[in-house]
Amino acid sequence: MHRIELSDRWVERQLIERLPRNERVKASLKNLLKSYSTIAELIPAFIAPSVLQLTASTALMARAVRRGIKEEKTLFQHSKILESRGLGSTAKNLEGIIDRLPDFQAFIYATDEFYRDHIEHQIRVAVLGDFLLSQHFEYDGERIKLVDRICSATDIAEEDVSKAWWIASLFHDTGIPVAKLSKNLNDFMGDLAKVYEKVNLGLSHVDCPIPNEDENRLMFKALSKGLSKPTVTKLRAALGWDGTSRIDHGAISALLLLRSIPKLASLGYDELVDQLEHDFKPYLMAAQAIVFHNLYQDANRIEIDSKDNPLAYLLVCCDEMQEWNRDVSIKVRSVFDPKFGTTRLMDHCFVELSSDSIELLAEFENQEAKDNCGFVFDYYVAEKKLDLHRLKNTQQIFPKIRLRYIDHVFHEHKLVRRVEEKISTDA
């Protein structure tokens, strides 16, 4: 069994392998200088001055290089990742979304009670899925690469599968700000109404941030073409068009993805469908994976069969598996000192690959972080079970997916209990 530690260093290595040579050198230099600057900070005072000068210069150089590199953290920008995969045109088509990613994150961190990072999360999901697609698993005694298995079972070209995966994974959560908008505004206006109760501000309720306009209906019709009537009904509800259901960020992300492509903006229905089924086929595949990935609650639950939508199946698996280095928002509410910050529940986890399974091990050991962000382990596990148990692998296209989570409960730095839960797609 092959065991891999999942961390952002691992993600970075996966990304660098496909970067142009000059970018690989820059990234390697960044890591090297980062290591040198760390050493410089640890040099004891009794070392010779010449060595101190050298290490100090190295530290200054490291800081200068970091300032010259646009990426603030370990990972690269969405546009650069797409370009490194030969998908520069995709980066251009989705430029409107990519340019707004910082605003996306800032809005949610500032307004949501419990928010987990989604920008770098999407990158980690993308890299994990790309890695799994390249791995070999055993099918009827023969070792076959996962992407080849998907292609043979669905009659989709490998190039389209790869392109659609990068699009789906890198943009599957971009609808979150819109999904949160109506709730946040209504909560905010409700609070204002309470504070200024006697003033009677007359604040209006926001029913739906995605109006059912002609353009949205046209794109939705193309997106849902060929789906069953009950499924279409649930997707309409997920967009808030029935006036009763909670708006789903996956449905909005899928619509946003297609609406963001400039060439599709002014097309009639027949021409739109033709473009999506031919020139823009990977975008349609990506949108059809995104639209289902979050619909796991009882009211809007949609099952996913790997034969009908392998990318949605993979997206759900990788979305649930991605835990390492993921920041969670912290709010300390005080009249005199309102603070907004982040914490991290987990620094790394492990994945083990065998001939017929993918197994994840993740441990929560940071009690202070759990307490600060209100983390509840059993609720967290229950949500994952709901999501993964709707996956159907009737033709055994995917290997078994097994997740193992361990929660370490501490009190005053003493371990009180170790709680373990297991989830499996073959349950």
Image (spheres, rainbow, N blue to C red):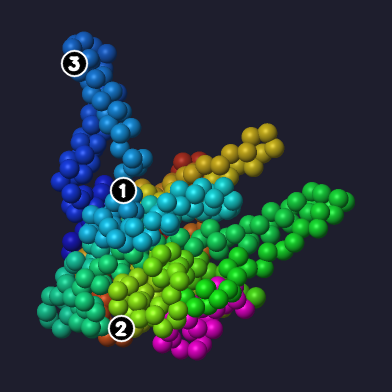
Which residue appears at 46% of the width and 41% of the height?
413
Kindly identify which residue carries mark 3.
51
Q: Is residue 255 or residue 290 the one in the foreground?
A: 255
Q: The magenta stretch spans which residues?
A: 220-242
Q: Secondary structure at mark 1?
A: loop
Q: Is residue 177 visible?
A: yes
> Which element is circle 2 on?
loop
For the residue pair 209 and 58, the one nearer the viewer reads as 209
Q: Nearer the viewer, mark 2 or mark 1?
A: 1
Residue 229, magenta (yes or no): yes
Q: What is the C-alpha distance between the residues marked 2 and 1? A: 32 Å
Mark 3 residue element:
helix
- Quadrant housing the N terminus: bottom left
Q: At 23% from the left edge and 15% from the top edge, which residue is drawn?
A: 52
Residue 307: image tag: 2
Q: On the picture, is 137 further left or further right than 306?
A: left
Q: Disc 1 designates what residue?
A: 76
Give the residue at x 17% y 72%.
145
* Amino acid bearing label 1: Phe
Mark 1 vs mark 3: in front? 1
Taking 401 as reference, is 145 left or right? left
Which x, y percent locates residue 106? Answer: 51, 47
What is the x, y in percent for residue 426? 33, 78
Image-quadrant location for residue 88 = bottom left
Q: Main secondary structure of the magenta part?
A: helix
